[in-house]
Image (spheres, coloured by chain):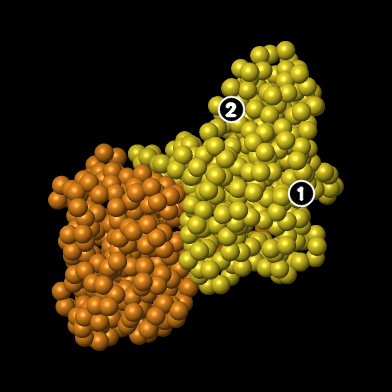
Chain colours: A yellow, B orange
Amino acid sequence: MKINIDGKTSDFKAVWYEEPVIKMIDQRILPESFKIVDIRNTKELYDAIKDMTVRGAPSIGAAAAYGVAQARALGKDIEEAGKLIKSARPTAYDLFFAVDFVLQHKEEASRYAEKYVDSIVERSRLIGVNGNELIGNSKKILTHCNAGALASVDYGTALSPIRKAKESGKNPFVWVDETRPRLQGARLTAWELVQEGIEHKVIADNAAGFLMYRGQVDLAIVGADRITKNGDFANKIGTYEKAVLAKENGVSFYVAAPLSTFDFSIENGRDIPIEVRSEEEVKDIKGMAISPRESHAYNPAFDVTPNRYVTAYITEYGVYKSSELQKLKGKGKESIIEQIGNI
Amino acid sequence: MKINIDGKTSDFKAVWYEEPVIKMIDQRILPESFKIVDIRNTKELYDAIKDMTVRGAPSIGAAAAYGVAQARALGKDIEEAGKLIKSARPTAYDLFFAVDFVLQHKEEASRYAEKYVDSIVERSRLIGVNGNELIGNSKKILTHCNAGALASVDYGTALSPIRKAKESGKNPFVWVDETRPRLQGARLTAWELVQEGIEHKVIADNAAGFLMYRGQVDLAIVGADRITKNGDFANKIGTYEKAVLAKENGVSFYVAAPLSTFDFSIENGRDIPIEVRSEEEVKDIKGMAISPRESHAYNPAFDVTPNRYVTAYITEYGVYKSSELQKLKGKGKESIIEQIGNI
């Protein structure tokens, strides 16, 4: 992704590897500060995933793939490392997918970690190419959370079609849900759109429904943290709300994700583990209390949206309805290795 | 309302009058600070309504009623004062209702302003009595924004039935939507519930839908800023989202409001003016930027919910379905004076 720092444009990925150091953009402090964090061992990686220094399902997967390679480079027990890395967060499927993939190639862990991440970048790019076909000229697009380049190493999942639409001269406009509690929309998606010169406005999450009701949203595109066999999917809390409102108002609702986010071992969304994060993420903003100290909060980080609210899934292989997702399973042929190779 | 200050419980109203000074709880700085603001003239009142020192449709109405009385006490042109006060905010109907009522009794403005505010308090209390009949034991109730005592001088509209339920030993639990951008839920509703010892948890607005989907919400009660003839109503941005989600999930959705919020001159919600407030309310939280400075925001302060999403309206006269609202019009008999007297 292009990033403008002090008037100079540079090219960055959200995560990369300079053996034995994993490098990542610190996603906790954007847009105020742009900083690269060095991850020197598995414990640091575990913390960086857990505290969301790196976030977004495909980027978490990339960091995890490098984590296994790093453990090997440092002469550590890589099975143990993989186990710790997998325990950092429960919902995003890419985390498990990536660790298992590199563990299957432990003898050449670094090479396969790079192969995995290269594949994620190429898959993200292809999601853009495929999704762009759904976007007409001058469309108003709603997105939730950040499913951009920061979330998927480069290009993005939900933002990749929008980047491609801009690149092909279509002039898209983006309504950016601020995405409480962690404000990934207001902080990260808005920041990416500024870098790309894509027109946008930030809105309170509460406003998305009313904009749809008034006909000010042409389509919605979101990312996903895990998609089950029937097309139910977990994504950032609030996604379910926007999906229901899109259906109620006749707005097309797309989910953009690479094959690494599809968990064909789970039949439907009821079985996806939903991470509950700390009360403080709701009760405080940037360390300042917004609620009475006596009050408690409840903070589910994700929700599950049933397949009936999804118009289609934008993948690197094409655009599918939920009834067609079985075809996608074929692309992976049950084998993680083949899935990585097969684009 | 009972307020615990430094371990001592006192009784307060959100707004009161010590001629010629209007007194109000500063709702911008709760829950960190509890402060009473003195309003000494019409310009100060205009600012206090506009900047939301006083907020909530019935409390705005009360402040406006006192404002006309104050202008008279100060020997000012009260028609001019009424006009300025009415221009402070466009959506809440109580503002216009209250000013017109006191202007109709300009010779005894102070007495009629008090009569108006006493009536609002009694109406709020009765909303609690009537709404309590809808609340079973140990119910989980979702509310949005603050429709509590702060918003309606005392008791509240949406919170009045919950207070009454607690008082009658029913042990209600409240899910408090934090209500971005101004966080009236996290700041004000949570604070009121702490004062009353009512069990509650604050949630990101994004989480309300998922809680309904998982069966963790038994009913929803919200306030209103203006209700039209057919039952469509304006309320804090996000209300429409929660109403759609309640219907989708079979959760009863109630609107609690006194007759002063009903605008029978408007057929339906399309004609309610919707205030758009400053971008900064979205882009900043407590003066700290959360979005890139290059990004813009869009900040509609209210939305309109069509009557089809409302289970019933809880009023001081009883509980009505939208098809029955004409009966309520009869209670007011077209005349503001009779409306005030008629409870």
B24 or B234, which is in the foreground?
Answer: B234
Q: Is residue A116 left or right of residue B328?
A: right
Residue at the spot 29% in from the left edge and 75% down from the top edge: B322
| Position of the N terminus of chain B by quadrant | bottom left
Give me the chain letter of mark 1.
A
Residue position for label 2 = A86
The residue type indicated by label 1 comes to Arg
| Position of the C terminus of chain B by quadrant | bottom left
Where residue A71 appears, as percent x and y from the top left, is: 70, 19
Where residue A271 appears, as percent x and y from the top left, is: 46, 39
Residue at the spot 18% in from the left edge and 64% down from the top edge: B130
Residue at the spot 50% in from the left edge and 51% down from the top edge: A305
The residue type indicated by label 2 comes to Lys
Q: Is residue A164 left or right of residue B163?
A: right
Residue A54 visible from this viewpoint: no
Residue at the spot 40% in from the left edge and 51% down from the top edge: B213
> Hey, which quadrant is residue B110 in on the image?
bottom left
User: Vertical placement of B339 versus A327: above or below?
Assistant: below
> Hey, which quadrant is residue B96 in on the image?
bottom left
Where residue A119 appears, as percent x and y from the top left, is: 76, 39
Residue position for label 1 = A125
User: Vertical placement of A160 versus B102: above or below?
Assistant: above
Give me the chain letter of mark 2.
A
Callout 1 touching callout 2 (CB < 8 Å) = no
Residue B198: give its label.
none
Where residue A238 appears, as percent x and y from the top left, is: 50, 51
